[in-house]
Image (cartoon, coloured by chain):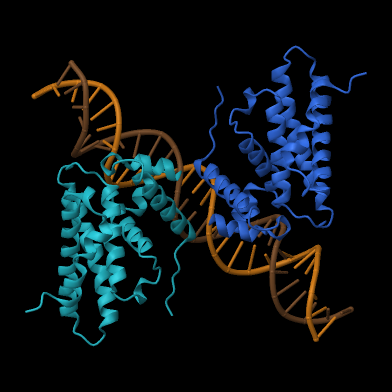
Chain colours: A blue, B cyan, C brown, D orange
Amino acid sequence: MSEAKTDPRILRTRKLIMDSFINLSSKKEFKDITVKDITTEAMINRATFYYHFKGIYDLLDKALTEVLFVNLNCRDYENSDLTKENLVSLFIAITDFQVSLSNRCHRGYEETIARIIRDQLEVILFRMLVRQHPDEVEEGLKLNATMLSWGLYGASMEWRRNRSSVSPEKFIKTAIPYIQNGIGN
Amino acid sequence: MSEAKTDPRILRTRKLIMDSFINLSSKKEFKDITVKDITTEAMINRATFYYHFKGIYDLLDKALTEVLFVNLNCRDYENSDLTKENLVSLFIAITDFQVSLSNRCHRGYEETIARIIRDQLEVILFRMLVRQHPDEVEEGLKLNATMLSWGLYGASMEWRRNRSSVSPEKFIKTAIPYIQNGIGN
DNA sequence: CTTGATGTGTTGGATATCCAACATTTTCGC
DNA sequence: GCGAAAATGTTGGATATCCAACACATCAAG
């Protein structure tokens, strides 16, 4: 009954900001991207940016969701199962995104970024798990999603330590069997 | 002294409309493009379109200028001479644009489009000629630009009649010597 | 430490854009 | 032809966006 559609200007402006940010991320280190850079590229006023986002990390939070979904090729992520292929896609999305970010530690922002990535991962994984196992209690699925998100992020950190040796896809695939079948007995 | 810079919203909206129009032109026939199509793609309100343009032919007029300049690779067209290369570029820009428009006669709109193309051509040619011959009287250069614009447009119509036989570039190059050196005596 | 330069956030009044509604014209099937 | 559907333009009040200015934090250079 309560629809309350949002003003088209809001949708347009958000899209302009998101696109500009993602575009800039592929050209510059994250730590070098300023709010002014984004608003200039998006052709909107700096004040307008703060009307929509609490700050650049709030934007990062929401943009990351977009990136993960795009790399998953699923606008209807709600209807997607947690398949082996989706796990690989998620991992690749993470590593792709991370190399576009700063490598240098920037005043503890690394941990902020890490938290954002894990949070978004957890949300996506949880939704997939709920869809895949509609009869299970949600608490167990939630914890499963939490642990998987930490595990995937940790794997991406491990991959970063020696990225030149193997592709992200091949790297994560070595772990897939354990994720799917457990560690056994 | 009098600067009076225009509101950024105006520049952004105009760009969104132009880009959407040019984008749509490459997918649909011109006669099938409606104002609603453009505003939907540009994510702006239909009323806003009329705030900026008198109608779809006013947009066509201004967009055509953009296309011609882009195909000329000269943002600073003011500082460009009327070289052989620029003539070829102009002709290619015209034919490229025409094939993206409707082929069918659409209530005499063909003539409207033709007039717009010639008008824009004339403006560009005149500016180039004035720059190239700063000492000549402008009346002569003006008439020269007028005749050249009609001639170029006529050549594009002739090329359309049997376009499959030869490329626009090769087609116009057969006429370049006469344009440059005159018909002789 | 001081100074200048740069980035972050915030605010109040001005303005471009939105919406809903309307009249008119064009298009198209019957 | 006729009527319905769709496209074109136009208007007044609501709202998102812009601008200029401000306070504050950060950082490098002298």
- D15 and B144: which one is in front? B144
Q: Position of residue B175 (x, y in %)?
A: 18, 66
The number of numbered discs placed on residues in the rendered structure image is: 0
Q: Is C22 positioned to the left or the right of B156 in the image? A: right
Q: Residue furthest top?
A: A135
Q: Residue furthest right?
A: A185
In the picture, which quadrant includes the N terminus of chain B?
bottom left
Picture layout, residue A181 above or below residue C22: above
Q: Splitting the image into 4 quarters, where does residue A133 fall?
A: top right
Q: Position of residue A160 (x, y in %)?
A: 80, 47
Q: Is B86 positioned to the left or the right of A152 in the image? A: left
In the picture, which quadrant includes the C terminus of chain B?
bottom left
Q: Splitting the image into 4 quarters, where does residue B11 fall?
A: bottom left
Q: Splitting the image into 4 quarters, where does residue B138 fall?
A: bottom left
The residue that appears at 60% across and 33% down in the rendered structure is A73
Specify whether residue A45 is in view.
no
Q: Position of residue A53 (x, y in %)?
A: 66, 48
- B168 and B87: which one is in front? B168
Picture layout, residue A85 above or below residue B58: above
Specify whether residue A12 is in view.
yes
Q: Is A151 positioned to the left or the right of B83 in the image? A: right
Q: Position of residue A72 (x, y in %)?
A: 64, 34
The residue that appears at 73% across and 58% down in the rendered structure is A31
Q: Residue furthest bottom?
A: B135
The residue that appears at 20% across and 85% down in the rendered structure is B136
The residue that appears at 19% across and 78% down in the rendered structure is B141
- A131 and D26: which one is in front? A131
